[in-house]
Image (tube, rainbow, N blue to C red):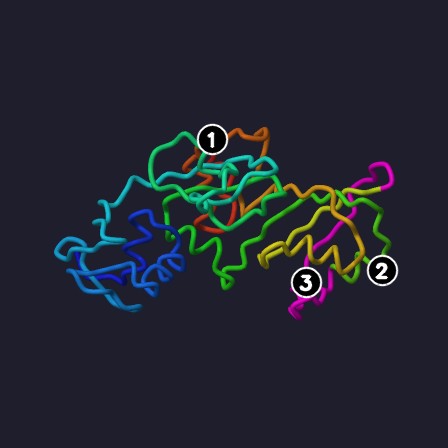
Amino acid sequence: MTAERLQKILAQAGYGSRRACEDFIVAGRVRVNGRIAELGQKADPATDTITVDGEPIPATETLIYVALHKPRNVLSAVAKERGDNRPTVRDLVDAPGHLYPVGRLDFESEGLVLMTNDGDLANRLTHPRYGHEKEYRVLLAKRPDQEQLEAWRRGVVLEDGHRTAPVDVRYESSQGKGAWVRVVMREGRKRQIRETCQQLALPVVRIIRTRIGTLRLGSLKPRQWRYLTMTEVNELKSGEPLKKKNRR
């Protein structure tokens, strides 16, 4: 086996996306042959001893892909801080391996979460340059007017000064005094939908993620999970649906 960058080796061993593994290296948690590793360093897991927090990395795991319907009030994390008793998405998935969520879905939001130990796929789905879409259904406490929808579509300046990228927002249906809207976006800043709606004076009642790239929530109920089919995995990796004739 040839030498590869450490973040790629760690991602393949199930420690998270490449960017998350870079953070491990920068924090000094990774050693190669007893020496603290540096960002950009290469190693060969067949001949070098690589440790994280003093523990040897495992052999490359069988790649696992899980779709979960995260309910409200569950953390999109694998581990939690000491004293935090809130459940995590990992608590809901009874599957082996170092699974971690790809991207985040905030504590109050619900819907589709992809969990995997495939660091390369996680990198493709979260890195801005690939621009994978995420789709949401959002229940607003009041019906948006055309001006608010147009502003949302163009992009909104948030409290921290960041201007959001253009998004596809469509009115779906009314519900009481409120309304359901469909939101498709390529950007993925933390709590972006909630903060955008705050700037537009549109109180949010619910946020449900229904799609990540080509993967859809489908009929999964809250707390339910399932393994992805190989067709779904290949679609995620290619970024587009395979032809129907290839489906089984």
**Residue drawn at point x = 33 percent, y = 53 percent:** 11
* Side of 5 where 229 appears, left or right: right
Membership of 158 in magenta stretch: yes
Compare marks 1 and 2 and give the one earlier in the sequence: 2
Q: Which region of the structure is painted magenta?
A: 153-177
Residues packed near mark 1 inside 10 Å, few (<14), some (14 to 19) or many (20 plus): few
Q: Is residue 48 above or below residue 210?
A: below
Mark pair 1, 3: CA separation: 32 Å
Residue at mark 2: 147
Going by the numbered disc 2, the residue's amino acid type is: Glu
Residue at mark 1: 226
Return the residue nearer the eye: 159 or 67. 159
* Side of 165 where 44 appears, left or right: left
Which picture quadrant has residue 216? Answer: top right
Secondary element at image label 3 = loop
Residues packed near mark 2 inside 10 Å, few (<14), some (14 to 19) or many (20 plus): few
Residue at mark 3: 166
Compare marks 3 and 2 and give the one earlier in the sequence: 2
Compare marks 1 and 3 and give the one earlier in the sequence: 3
Q: Please provide percent x and percent y for residue 26.
A: 34, 65
Mark pair 1, 2: CA separation: 41 Å
Residue 234 seen anywhere in this rendered image of the structure: no
Secondary element at image label 2 = helix
* Side of 2 where 116 appears, left or right: right
